[in-house]
Amino acid sequence: MDRRQEILEAAAKSFSLFGYKATTMDQVAKIANVGKGTIYTFFANKEELFNAIVLQMVEEMRVASDAATVEGATFEQNAHARLMQMLKFRETHQLYAKLVDEGKELRTPAVIEVLAEIENEIVSYIRAKIELAIDKGELKPCDSELVAYLLFKSYMALVVDWGKTHENEELSEERIAGLLRSTIFTSLLA
Amino acid sequence: MDRRQEILEAAAKSFSLFGYKATTMDQVAKIANVGKGTIYTFFANKEELFNAIVLQMVEEMRVASDAATVEGATFEQNAHARLMQMLKFRETHQLYAKLVDEGKELRTPAVIEVLAEIENEIVSYIRAKIELAIDKGELKPCDSELVAYLLFKSYMALVVDWGKTHENEELSEERIAGLLRSTIFTSLLA
DNA sequence: TTTTTGACCATAAATCAATTTTGGTCATCC
DNA sequence: GGATGACCAAAATTGATTTATGGTCAAAAA
Protein backbone atom coordinates (compact mmCIF):
# COMPACT_ATOMS: atom_id res chain seq x y z
CA MET A 1 0.00 0.00 0.00
CA ASP A 2 1.19 3.49 -0.85
CA ARG A 3 1.91 5.10 2.50
CA ARG A 4 1.84 8.60 1.12
CA GLN A 5 -1.60 7.97 -0.33
CA GLU A 6 -2.84 6.47 2.94
CA ILE A 7 -1.73 9.57 4.75
CA LEU A 8 -3.38 11.87 2.24
CA GLU A 9 -6.66 10.02 2.56
CA ALA A 10 -6.53 10.01 6.32
CA ALA A 11 -5.73 13.70 6.40
CA ALA A 12 -8.51 14.53 3.94
CA LYS A 13 -10.97 12.64 6.09
CA SER A 14 -9.86 14.28 9.31
CA PHE A 15 -9.67 17.83 7.94
CA SER A 16 -13.12 17.38 6.39
CA LEU A 17 -14.58 16.08 9.61
CA PHE A 18 -12.90 18.30 12.18
CA GLY A 19 -11.27 21.17 10.33
CA TYR A 20 -7.66 22.24 10.47
CA LYS A 21 -7.16 23.15 14.08
CA ALA A 22 -9.00 20.20 15.57
CA THR A 23 -7.09 17.73 13.42
CA THR A 24 -4.03 16.46 15.24
CA MET A 25 -1.07 14.78 13.63
CA ASP A 26 -1.50 11.88 16.06
CA GLN A 27 -5.02 11.46 14.81
CA VAL A 28 -3.99 11.47 11.16
CA ALA A 29 -1.30 8.90 11.95
CA LYS A 30 -3.80 6.70 13.73
CA ILE A 31 -6.37 6.89 10.91
CA ALA A 32 -3.67 6.19 8.35
CA ASN A 33 -2.31 3.29 10.39
CA VAL A 34 1.11 4.82 10.32
CA GLY A 35 3.59 6.05 12.88
CA LYS A 36 3.49 9.79 13.38
CA GLY A 37 7.08 10.13 12.25
CA THR A 38 6.20 8.64 8.89
CA ILE A 39 4.00 11.58 8.06
CA TYR A 40 7.01 13.84 8.39
CA THR A 41 8.96 11.87 5.80
CA PHE A 42 6.39 12.97 3.21
CA PHE A 43 5.28 16.37 4.46
CA ALA A 44 7.45 18.95 6.15
CA ASN A 45 4.76 19.93 8.63
CA LYS A 46 1.05 20.07 9.31
CA GLU A 47 0.53 23.06 7.08
CA GLU A 48 2.15 21.44 4.07
CA LEU A 49 0.00 18.36 4.53
CA PHE A 50 -2.99 20.67 4.70
CA ASN A 51 -1.97 22.48 1.54
CA ALA A 52 -1.67 19.19 -0.30
CA ILE A 53 -5.24 18.29 0.68
CA VAL A 54 -6.57 21.68 -0.34
CA LEU A 55 -4.78 21.43 -3.66
CA GLN A 56 -6.64 18.20 -4.35
CA MET A 57 -9.89 19.93 -3.51
CA VAL A 58 -9.22 22.86 -5.80
CA GLU A 59 -8.66 20.37 -8.59
CA GLU A 60 -11.97 18.67 -7.77
CA MET A 61 -13.68 22.02 -7.88
CA ARG A 62 -12.19 22.86 -11.23
CA VAL A 63 -13.47 19.57 -12.61
CA ALA A 64 -16.93 20.16 -11.15
CA SER A 65 -17.02 23.65 -12.59
CA ASP A 66 -15.93 22.52 -16.03
CA ALA A 67 -18.57 19.81 -15.90
CA ALA A 68 -21.21 22.52 -15.48
CA THR A 69 -20.42 24.08 -18.85
CA VAL A 70 -22.47 23.35 -21.94
CA GLU A 71 -20.77 23.12 -25.30
CA GLY A 72 -22.13 25.80 -27.58
CA ALA A 73 -23.79 27.85 -24.87
CA THR A 74 -23.14 31.59 -24.58
CA PHE A 75 -20.42 33.00 -22.37
CA GLU A 76 -23.06 34.33 -20.02
CA GLN A 77 -24.79 30.98 -19.66
CA ASN A 78 -21.57 29.13 -19.00
CA ALA A 79 -20.10 31.75 -16.72
CA HIS A 80 -23.29 31.73 -14.68
CA ALA A 81 -23.42 27.94 -14.53
CA ARG A 82 -19.76 27.69 -13.54
CA LEU A 83 -19.91 30.35 -10.87
CA MET A 84 -23.07 28.93 -9.36
CA GLN A 85 -21.46 25.50 -9.40
CA MET A 86 -18.39 26.75 -7.56
CA LEU A 87 -20.49 28.53 -4.95
CA LYS A 88 -22.59 25.42 -4.50
CA PHE A 89 -19.38 23.44 -4.09
CA ARG A 90 -18.32 25.96 -1.50
CA GLU A 91 -21.20 25.17 0.80
CA THR A 92 -21.74 21.56 -0.19
CA HIS A 93 -18.26 20.10 -0.15
CA GLN A 94 -17.57 18.95 3.38
CA LEU A 95 -14.00 20.23 3.56
CA TYR A 96 -14.67 23.57 1.90
CA ALA A 97 -17.69 24.24 4.10
CA LYS A 98 -15.73 23.31 7.21
CA LEU A 99 -12.91 25.63 6.25
CA VAL A 100 -15.21 28.56 5.55
CA ASP A 101 -16.75 28.04 8.96
CA GLU A 102 -13.43 27.66 10.73
CA GLY A 103 -12.03 30.71 9.01
CA LYS A 104 -14.97 32.78 10.16
CA GLU A 105 -15.41 31.38 13.67
CA LEU A 106 -11.90 30.50 14.84
CA ARG A 107 -9.86 32.61 12.41
CA THR A 108 -7.19 29.96 12.21
CA PRO A 109 -4.49 31.80 10.24
CA ALA A 110 -3.53 28.77 8.11
CA VAL A 111 -7.18 28.42 7.13
CA ILE A 112 -7.69 32.08 6.31
CA GLU A 113 -4.57 31.96 4.18
CA VAL A 114 -5.71 28.90 2.29
CA LEU A 115 -9.19 30.35 1.71
CA ALA A 116 -7.63 33.43 0.17
CA GLU A 117 -5.53 31.23 -2.10
CA ILE A 118 -8.61 29.30 -3.18
CA GLU A 119 -10.38 32.52 -4.07
CA ASN A 120 -7.37 33.67 -6.05
CA GLU A 121 -7.46 30.36 -7.86
CA ILE A 122 -11.15 30.82 -8.69
CA VAL A 123 -10.60 34.35 -9.96
CA SER A 124 -7.69 33.18 -12.12
CA TYR A 125 -9.90 30.44 -13.51
CA ILE A 126 -12.65 32.91 -14.40
CA ARG A 127 -10.11 35.23 -15.90
CA ALA A 128 -8.80 32.49 -18.16
CA LYS A 129 -12.32 31.78 -19.37
CA ILE A 130 -12.86 35.46 -20.11
CA GLU A 131 -9.65 35.71 -22.10
CA LEU A 132 -10.62 32.61 -24.03
CA ALA A 133 -13.96 34.19 -24.90
CA ILE A 134 -12.22 37.37 -25.97
CA ASP A 135 -9.91 35.41 -28.25
CA LYS A 136 -12.92 33.67 -29.74
CA GLY A 137 -14.44 37.07 -30.42
CA GLU A 138 -17.40 36.42 -28.17
CA LEU A 139 -16.48 39.17 -25.72
CA LYS A 140 -14.88 42.48 -26.44
CA PRO A 141 -11.46 43.12 -24.95
CA CYS A 142 -11.53 44.22 -21.33
CA ASP A 143 -9.50 44.38 -18.15
CA SER A 144 -9.91 40.64 -17.67
CA GLU A 145 -8.28 40.61 -14.24
CA LEU A 146 -10.66 43.17 -12.83
CA VAL A 147 -13.70 41.84 -14.64
CA ALA A 148 -13.04 38.35 -13.28
CA TYR A 149 -12.66 39.79 -9.81
CA LEU A 150 -15.85 41.84 -10.15
CA LEU A 151 -17.81 38.84 -11.39
CA PHE A 152 -16.64 36.64 -8.55
CA LYS A 153 -17.35 39.28 -5.94
CA SER A 154 -20.77 39.96 -7.41
CA TYR A 155 -21.78 36.34 -7.25
CA MET A 156 -20.42 36.03 -3.72
CA ALA A 157 -22.42 39.09 -2.72
CA LEU A 158 -25.68 37.97 -4.28
CA VAL A 159 -25.50 34.29 -3.40
CA VAL A 160 -23.66 34.30 -0.07
CA ASP A 161 -23.81 37.76 1.54
CA TRP A 162 -27.37 38.73 0.70
CA GLY A 163 -28.85 36.04 2.92
CA LYS A 164 -26.88 37.24 5.92
CA THR A 165 -28.48 40.67 6.08
CA HIS A 166 -31.88 39.72 4.66
CA GLU A 167 -33.10 37.09 7.09
CA ASN A 168 -33.46 33.78 5.28
CA GLU A 169 -34.72 35.56 2.17
CA GLU A 170 -32.34 33.97 -0.29
CA LEU A 171 -32.33 35.49 -3.75
CA SER A 172 -33.77 33.26 -6.47
CA GLU A 173 -31.29 32.12 -9.08
CA GLU A 174 -33.45 33.71 -11.75
CA ARG A 175 -33.36 37.10 -10.05
CA ILE A 176 -29.59 36.88 -9.77
CA ALA A 177 -29.19 35.80 -13.37
CA GLY A 178 -31.54 38.57 -14.50
CA LEU A 179 -29.66 41.26 -12.63
CA LEU A 180 -26.26 40.24 -13.91
CA ARG A 181 -27.54 39.77 -17.45
CA SER A 182 -28.90 43.31 -17.50
CA THR A 183 -25.79 44.82 -15.98
CA ILE A 184 -22.40 43.17 -16.27
CA PHE A 185 -22.82 40.41 -18.85
CA THR A 186 -24.52 42.45 -21.53
CA SER A 187 -21.83 45.08 -21.55
CA LEU A 188 -19.10 42.47 -21.99
CA LEU A 189 -20.47 41.14 -25.27
CA ALA A 190 -18.54 41.85 -28.45
CA MET B 1 -25.98 73.35 29.88
CA ASP B 2 -27.96 70.65 28.16
CA ARG B 3 -27.11 67.48 30.05
CA ARG B 4 -28.31 65.24 27.26
CA GLN B 5 -26.06 67.04 24.79
CA GLU B 6 -23.08 66.84 27.16
CA ILE B 7 -23.59 63.11 27.44
CA LEU B 8 -23.88 62.67 23.68
CA GLU B 9 -20.66 64.57 23.11
CA ALA B 10 -18.81 62.66 25.80
CA ALA B 11 -20.04 59.35 24.40
CA ALA B 12 -19.11 60.29 20.86
CA LYS B 13 -15.64 61.19 22.01
CA SER B 14 -15.17 58.02 23.98
CA PHE B 15 -16.59 55.65 21.35
CA SER B 16 -14.43 57.33 18.72
CA LEU B 17 -11.34 57.05 20.85
CA PHE B 18 -11.76 53.60 22.38
CA GLY B 19 -14.54 51.84 20.50
CA TYR B 20 -17.69 50.33 21.94
CA LYS B 21 -16.38 47.66 24.27
CA ALA B 22 -13.58 49.69 25.81
CA THR B 23 -15.89 52.59 26.54
CA THR B 24 -17.33 52.30 30.04
CA MET B 25 -20.37 54.11 31.29
CA ASP B 26 -18.29 55.41 34.20
CA GLN B 27 -15.91 56.92 31.70
CA VAL B 28 -18.67 58.59 29.73
CA ALA B 29 -20.10 59.98 32.95
CA LYS B 30 -16.72 61.30 33.98
CA ILE B 31 -16.07 62.96 30.61
CA ALA B 32 -19.55 64.44 30.59
CA ASN B 33 -19.12 65.68 34.17
CA VAL B 34 -22.27 63.91 35.15
CA GLY B 35 -23.26 61.19 37.58
CA LYS B 36 -23.51 57.78 35.99
CA GLY B 37 -27.16 57.52 36.95
CA THR B 38 -27.92 60.64 34.93
CA ILE B 39 -27.00 58.90 31.72
CA TYR B 40 -29.73 56.36 32.39
CA THR B 41 -32.37 59.07 32.61
CA PHE B 42 -31.75 59.82 28.92
CA PHE B 43 -30.70 56.46 27.50
CA ALA B 44 -32.08 53.07 28.49
CA ASN B 45 -28.67 51.38 28.33
CA LYS B 46 -25.23 51.48 26.77
CA GLU B 47 -26.44 50.12 23.45
CA GLU B 48 -29.09 52.81 23.04
CA LEU B 49 -26.56 55.49 23.77
CA PHE B 50 -24.33 53.88 21.17
CA ASN B 51 -27.13 53.79 18.62
CA ALA B 52 -27.79 57.47 19.16
CA ILE B 53 -24.16 58.28 18.43
CA VAL B 54 -24.11 56.10 15.34
CA LEU B 55 -27.31 57.72 14.09
CA GLN B 56 -25.58 61.09 14.28
CA MET B 57 -22.69 59.69 12.31
CA VAL B 58 -24.91 58.26 9.60
CA GLU B 59 -26.43 61.69 9.20
CA GLU B 60 -22.96 63.23 8.92
CA MET B 61 -22.11 60.70 6.27
CA ARG B 62 -25.25 61.44 4.30
CA VAL B 63 -24.35 65.13 4.35
CA ALA B 64 -20.79 64.42 3.26
CA SER B 65 -22.02 62.20 0.47
CA ASP B 66 -24.53 64.75 -0.78
CA ALA B 67 -21.83 67.36 -0.68
CA ALA B 68 -19.83 65.25 -3.14
CA THR B 69 -22.46 65.52 -5.84
CA VAL B 70 -22.24 68.01 -8.65
CA GLU B 71 -25.37 69.65 -9.98
CA GLY B 72 -25.84 68.73 -13.61
CA ALA B 73 -23.35 65.87 -13.62
CA THR B 74 -24.34 62.45 -14.97
CA PHE B 75 -25.71 59.73 -12.75
CA GLU B 76 -22.48 57.82 -13.17
CA GLN B 77 -20.30 60.73 -12.14
CA ASN B 78 -22.38 61.50 -9.08
CA ALA B 79 -22.84 57.87 -8.07
CA HIS B 80 -19.10 57.36 -8.30
CA ALA B 81 -18.33 60.52 -6.35
CA ARG B 82 -20.85 59.66 -3.65
CA LEU B 83 -19.76 56.08 -3.22
CA MET B 84 -16.09 57.02 -3.11
CA GLN B 85 -16.92 59.69 -0.58
CA MET B 86 -18.73 57.22 1.66
CA LEU B 87 -15.91 54.72 1.47
CA LYS B 88 -13.41 57.44 2.25
CA PHE B 89 -15.59 58.45 5.20
CA ARG B 90 -15.54 54.84 6.28
CA GLU B 91 -11.79 54.78 6.75
CA THR B 92 -11.29 58.43 7.61
CA HIS B 93 -13.97 59.12 10.18
CA GLN B 94 -12.53 58.19 13.54
CA LEU B 95 -15.63 56.48 14.88
CA TYR B 96 -16.46 54.58 11.71
CA ALA B 97 -12.89 53.36 11.32
CA LYS B 98 -12.76 52.30 14.96
CA LEU B 99 -16.00 50.37 14.59
CA VAL B 100 -14.90 48.58 11.44
CA ASP B 101 -11.77 47.55 13.25
CA GLU B 102 -13.57 46.48 16.41
CA GLY B 103 -16.13 44.53 14.41
CA LYS B 104 -13.38 42.64 12.63
CA GLU B 105 -10.98 42.13 15.51
CA LEU B 106 -13.17 41.74 18.60
CA ARG B 107 -16.46 40.87 16.92
CA THR B 108 -18.40 42.82 19.50
CA PRO B 109 -22.00 41.85 18.64
CA ALA B 110 -23.42 45.34 19.18
CA VAL B 111 -20.80 46.70 16.78
CA ILE B 112 -21.40 44.07 14.13
CA GLU B 113 -25.11 44.78 14.32
CA VAL B 114 -24.63 48.50 13.95
CA LEU B 115 -22.24 48.08 11.03
CA ALA B 116 -24.85 46.01 9.22
CA GLU B 117 -27.42 48.71 9.86
CA ILE B 118 -25.10 51.35 8.49
CA GLU B 119 -24.57 49.34 5.33
CA ASN B 120 -28.31 48.91 4.95
CA GLU B 121 -28.66 52.64 5.31
CA ILE B 122 -26.07 53.23 2.60
CA VAL B 123 -27.73 50.80 0.23
CA SER B 124 -31.11 52.44 0.83
CA TYR B 125 -29.55 55.79 0.11
CA ILE B 126 -28.07 54.56 -3.16
CA ARG B 127 -31.36 52.97 -4.06
CA ALA B 128 -33.21 56.23 -3.56
CA LYS B 129 -30.76 57.99 -5.87
CA ILE B 130 -31.27 55.31 -8.50
CA GLU B 131 -35.02 55.63 -8.33
CA LEU B 132 -34.73 59.37 -8.61
CA ALA B 133 -32.60 58.99 -11.74
CA ILE B 134 -35.13 56.56 -13.18
CA ASP B 135 -37.94 59.03 -12.56
CA LYS B 136 -35.91 61.71 -14.27
CA GLY B 137 -35.55 59.41 -17.25
CA GLU B 138 -31.76 59.28 -16.89
CA LEU B 139 -31.69 55.57 -16.13
CA LYS B 140 -33.91 52.87 -17.48
CA PRO B 141 -36.14 51.06 -14.98
CA CYS B 142 -34.38 48.30 -13.08
CA ASP B 143 -34.47 46.23 -9.91
CA SER B 144 -33.29 49.22 -7.90
CA GLU B 145 -32.89 47.27 -4.67
CA LEU B 146 -30.53 44.75 -6.24
CA VAL B 147 -28.72 47.27 -8.40
CA ALA B 148 -28.04 49.44 -5.34
CA TYR B 149 -26.77 46.39 -3.48
CA LEU B 150 -24.59 45.34 -6.41
CA LEU B 151 -23.12 48.81 -6.77
CA PHE B 152 -22.29 49.07 -3.09
CA LYS B 153 -20.74 45.61 -2.99
CA SER B 154 -18.75 46.30 -6.14
CA TYR B 155 -17.25 49.46 -4.72
CA MET B 156 -16.51 47.72 -1.43
CA ALA B 157 -14.79 44.93 -3.33
CA LEU B 158 -12.68 47.18 -5.52
CA VAL B 159 -11.81 49.83 -2.96
CA VAL B 160 -11.63 47.85 0.28
CA ASP B 161 -11.20 44.13 -0.43
CA TRP B 162 -8.79 44.28 -3.35
CA GLY B 163 -5.99 45.69 -1.22
CA LYS B 164 -6.27 42.84 1.25
CA THR B 165 -5.36 40.10 -1.21
CA HIS B 166 -3.09 42.14 -3.46
CA GLU B 167 -0.39 43.34 -1.12
CA ASN B 168 -0.53 47.13 -0.85
CA GLU B 169 -1.35 47.36 -4.57
CA GLU B 170 -4.37 49.60 -4.22
CA LEU B 171 -6.43 50.06 -7.36
CA SER B 172 -6.28 53.53 -8.85
CA GLU B 173 -9.54 55.45 -8.77
CA GLU B 174 -9.36 55.77 -12.54
CA ARG B 175 -9.09 52.03 -13.04
CA ILE B 176 -12.08 51.49 -10.78
CA ALA B 177 -14.11 54.15 -12.51
CA GLY B 178 -13.15 52.74 -15.90
CA LEU B 179 -14.17 49.22 -15.00
CA LEU B 180 -17.54 50.22 -13.61
CA ARG B 181 -18.22 52.60 -16.48
CA SER B 182 -17.65 49.85 -19.01
CA THR B 183 -19.72 47.31 -17.10
CA ILE B 184 -22.46 48.32 -14.72
CA PHE B 185 -23.01 52.02 -15.32
CA THR B 186 -23.29 51.91 -19.09
CA SER B 187 -25.96 49.26 -19.02
CA LEU B 188 -28.08 51.27 -16.59
CA LEU B 189 -28.41 54.28 -18.90
CA ALA B 190 -31.80 54.98 -20.44
C1' DT C 1 21.10 0.43 4.46
C1' DT C 2 16.89 2.43 4.34
C1' DT C 3 12.47 3.14 6.20
C1' DT C 4 9.32 3.34 10.00
C1' DT C 5 8.22 4.25 14.52
C1' DG C 6 6.56 6.13 18.99
C1' DA C 7 8.63 7.84 23.37
C1' DC C 8 10.11 12.28 24.25
C1' DC C 9 10.41 17.47 24.53
C1' DA C 10 9.51 22.33 24.34
C1' DT C 11 5.86 25.09 23.63
C1' DA C 12 1.17 26.31 23.04
C1' DA C 13 -3.46 25.78 24.50
C1' DA C 14 -7.10 24.72 27.76
C1' DT C 15 -8.73 24.94 32.67
C1' DC C 16 -10.27 27.03 36.55
C1' DA C 17 -10.34 29.68 40.89
C1' DA C 18 -9.52 34.15 42.51
C1' DT C 19 -9.88 38.82 41.46
C1' DT C 20 -11.34 42.86 39.13
C1' DT C 21 -14.35 45.36 36.23
C1' DT C 22 -18.67 46.95 34.54
C1' DG C 23 -23.57 47.78 33.27
C1' DG C 24 -27.33 48.98 35.59
C1' DT C 25 -30.23 50.23 39.99
C1' DC C 26 -32.12 52.92 43.65
C1' DA C 27 -32.06 55.05 48.29
C1' DT C 28 -30.39 59.34 49.37
C1' DC C 29 -29.29 64.07 48.83
C1' DC C 30 -29.36 68.74 47.11
C1' DG D 1 -37.92 65.92 41.93
C1' DG D 2 -33.93 65.50 39.16
C1' DA D 3 -29.18 64.16 39.87
C1' DT D 4 -26.02 61.20 42.07
C1' DG D 5 -22.64 57.60 43.31
C1' DA D 6 -22.35 53.60 46.58
C1' DC D 7 -23.81 49.22 45.70
C1' DC D 8 -24.78 44.60 43.42
C1' DA D 9 -25.00 40.68 40.41
C1' DA D 10 -22.98 39.21 36.44
C1' DA D 11 -19.34 39.24 33.29
C1' DA D 12 -14.59 39.71 32.13
C1' DT D 13 -9.72 39.31 33.30
C1' DT D 14 -5.80 37.20 35.30
C1' DG D 15 -2.41 33.88 36.27
C1' DA D 16 -0.96 29.62 38.02
C1' DT D 17 -1.48 24.87 36.81
C1' DT D 18 -2.51 21.22 33.91
C1' DT D 19 -3.10 19.12 29.47
C1' DA D 20 -2.50 18.59 24.56
C1' DT D 21 0.17 19.04 20.34
C1' DG D 22 3.60 19.71 16.58
C1' DG D 23 7.76 18.16 15.60
C1' DT D 24 12.36 15.31 16.51
C1' DC D 25 15.36 11.51 16.65
C1' DA D 26 17.55 7.33 18.55
C1' DA D 27 16.34 2.89 18.04
C1' DA D 28 13.73 -0.96 15.88
C1' DA D 29 12.12 -3.12 11.75
C1' DA D 30 12.42 -4.27 7.07
Image (cartoon, coloured by chain):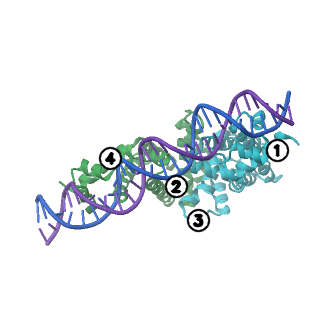
Chain colours: A green, B cyan, C purple, D blue
Badge 3 is on which residue? B169
Label 1, residues with CA under 10 Å away: few <14, some 14-19, many ≥20: some
Is B37 displayed left or right of A157 in the figure? right
How many angstroms separate mark 4 from mark 2 (CA)? 44 Å
Label 2, residues with CA under 10 Å away: few <14, some 14-19, many ≥20: some
How many angstroms separate mark 1 from mark 2 (CA)? 63 Å
Residue mark closest to the camera, 1 vs 3: 1
Residue A179 appearing in the image: yes
Badge 1 is on which residue? B6
Most foreground residue, A79 or A17: A17
Q: Which mark is residue A14?
A: 4
Q: Are marks 3 and 4 in contact (CB under 8 Å)?
A: no
Q: Are marks 2 and 3 in contact (CB under 8 Å)?
A: no
How many angstroms separate mark 1 from mark 3 (CA)? 43 Å
Of callouts 1 and 3, which one flags the residue occurring earlier in the amino acid sequence? 1
Respond whether the residues carrying marks 2 and 3 are from the same subunit: no
Of callouts 4 and 2, which one flags the residue occurring earlier in the amino acid sequence? 4
Q: Are marks 4 and 1 in contact (CB under 8 Å)?
A: no
Q: Which mark is residue A138?
A: 2
Q: Secondary structure at mark 4?
A: helix
Image: B82 above or below B118: below
Q: Secondary structure at mark 2?
A: loop
Respond whether the residues carrying marks 4 and 2 are from the same subunit: yes
How many angstroms separate mark 3 from mark 4 (CA)? 37 Å
Three-letter residue code for mark 4: Ser
Label 4, residues with CA under 10 Å away: few <14, some 14-19, many ≥20: many
Q: Secondary structure at mark 3?
A: loop
* Residue at mark 4: chain: A
